[in-house]
Image: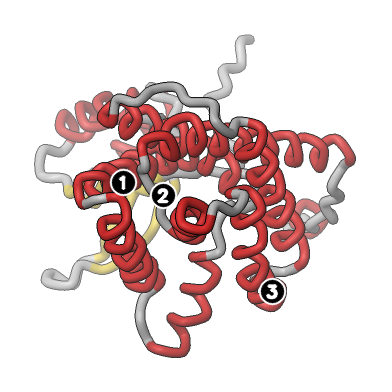
Amino acid sequence: MNLSSCIKLPQRKTVFSIIRKMIFLSLGAFIAGFAIEGFLVPNKIIDGGVVGVSMILSHLLKYNLGLLIVVLNIPFLCLALNKMGKTFLFQTFYAIAMLGIATNLFSHYEVTHDHLLATVFGGIILGFGVGLVLKNEGSLDGTEIMSLVLSKKFGLSVGEIIMGFNIFIYGASGLIFGWEQAMYSILTYFVAYRVIDVVIDGLDTSKSIRIISDCAEEIGKVLIEDLEIGVTYLYGKGGYSGADKTVIYCVVSRLEMSKLKEVVRKIDPMAFLSVVDVHEVYGTRMKKRIDKI
């Protein structure tokens, strides 16, 4: 075995990669700030988490929203120092500071007073901005950091704590702005949540495939040679029969999925297929190499 091929070389962050990350963190924060000031605030629609608390306090106390967002997130940033590391802390503080600046820059910039339009487009734009920040290893809200700490102390999941925190926020929003506005706020949250998933995971998710068949070698050969799909053979034993089994493992795109199913059905109609969504794939995939003589 060639050990030199397995040696991991240290990865150094280039100045370009750092600048690129800062640009995207700034862009995401400014997009989120535009959504908050242009769509949510004028229509009394509240975001979740610390930003939502800041919006309520800003309305009641007439304090600067951007300043409140930064100040109220500071305690959570202190928690992040021990849990997430200095890099995440710096990037999160930078993104939150940019969000504070953006809310001041877009203050009183009202795009629409139609509540439905504000809910849909405000949620889409907000989700895109937040997703861009999360994709570049930052955060605009300290709620998740708080949830990570409390989950270990009280035995609750992070999702349960965030949900409980947001129920409290939207309940307060209903008492202050009216229950109709609170319902719009909840819709905005779900729209933003779905857009965040799209930004982070992408639209073109791959599929992880496991194929169990008595014709595994034949199927694998067709996948490699005809469809140019890289495969890995795994070996196991049938729980019921006790017979040795060969399992084909591969990752394909959505377009390749239909071709793969057709090949498997043609060779072995009784083959077992397991399909799982894959949001990120790293490394290279082996392609067929044709040597012409």
> Which residue is pictured at 55% across the width and 57% down the height?
141
Task: Label 3: state its secondary structure.
Answer: helix
Q: Earlier in the sequence, mark 2 or mark 3?
A: 2
- Category of crowding for the residue at label 1, using alpha-carbon neighbours closer than 10 angstroms: few (below 14), some (14–19), many (at least 20): many
Mark 3–mark 1 CB contact (< 8 Å): no
Q: Nearer the viewer, mark 3 or mark 1?
A: 1
Cα–Cα span, label 2 and label 3: 23 Å
Q: Which residue, given by chain and number where applicable, does mark 2 sit on?
A: 47
Q: Nearer the viewer, residue 23 or 166?
A: 166
Question: At label 2, which amino acid type do we have?
Answer: Asp
Question: At label 3, which amino acid type do we have?
Answer: Cys
Image position of 169 (left or right of 280): left
Question: At label 1, which amino acid type do we have?
Answer: Ser
Task: Label 1: state its secondary structure.
Answer: helix
Q: Which residue, given by chain and number where applicable, does mark 3 sit on?
A: 78
Indicate whether 175 appears above or below 182. Answer: below
> Which residue is pictured at 40% across the width and 32% down the height?
122
